[in-house]
Amino acid sequence: MKISRGVRQETEVDELDLVSIGNQIVFDENGNKIKFGDVYKKQKTIIVFTRHLLCFMCKEYVEDLAVVPLEYLQDADVRIVVICPAPHKFIKPFRKVTGYNYSMYSDPDRNIYKAFGFKEKLTSTTLSKSKHVKSGFIMGVLSSTWRAMKVQEYQGDVKQQGGSLIIGPGNIIHYSHLDQNPTDHMAINDLLQISGVQTVSFPRDPRVIQV
């Protein structure tokens, strides 16, 4: 298994017990319990782990994830899944604000985040490094604050960083990236390319689309 630790360099990691991790529970938007391993049991799966759901950088990343055409995924037999560290009751509102309609689950106790070693610390970041954050810092923070004021509840630990996996079918990890800060997320097109999915032309990441 290969893991990228934020600098796009891969190192071999052998100590993860994928059977144990696969037995961890995630929740769907209705609160139903699902084994994490069942998420990728039968199909290669791109799994994006977000930060807290009030993070405007995560919101804008998932907005771009939402526009990946279903036919691109079907042609490659790949699915997209988002996992958040917030209670499951926040999934439906997050779908509404991002337009994201693919699978999404909750890991509120962050057991899977911890098992994979995702970072848990506040770090500074530069928005210009992201291919998916469109807002400036001030407008982004104001947007997050406005959403927080309407809900008045935390939607995940603010220190928790995210990451991404390409895993399955079964306990095979093809690629993994652990975000070092809020904008260190993998470019969506890089995840698509590694998974064998046709790339998409995003405003900040235009790619030549093969036709």
Image (spheres, rainbow, N blue to C red):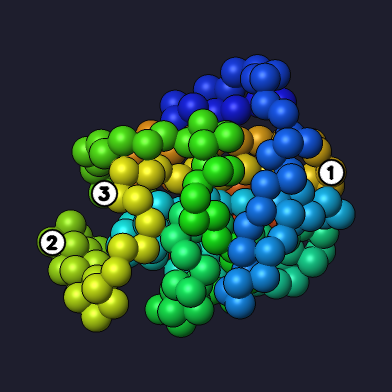
Residue 32 horizontal side relative to residue 98, left or right: right
* Residue of label 3: 127
Q: Amino acid at mark 3?
A: Leu
Above or below: residue 30 compared with residue 144: below
Tell me which label, 2 or 3, sits earlier in the chain: 3
Say if 6 sits above or below 97 in the image. Answer: above
Going from N to C along the chain, the mark reached first, 2 or 1, is 2
**On the image, numbered disc 1 is attached to which residue?**
170
Is residue 206 visible in the rendered image? The answer is: no
- The residue lying toward the viewer, choosing from 188 and 17, is 17
Residue at image position (28%, 77%) is 151
| Separation of marks 2 and 3 at Cα, in angstroms | 11 Å
Q: Position of residue 5 (x, y in %)?
A: 49, 27
Vertical comparison of 125 with 103: above or below: above
- Under circle 1, the secondary element is loop
At 13% from the left edge and 61% from the top edge, which residue is drawn? 138
Q: Residue at x 44, y 60 (%)?
A: 86
- Which of the 4 image quarters holds residue 33? bottom right
Q: Is residue 106 visible?
A: yes
Residue under circle 2?
Answer: 138
- Disc 1 to disc 3: CB gap under 8 Å: no
Tag 2, which secondary structure? helix
Q: Nearer the viewer, mark 1 or mark 3?
A: 1
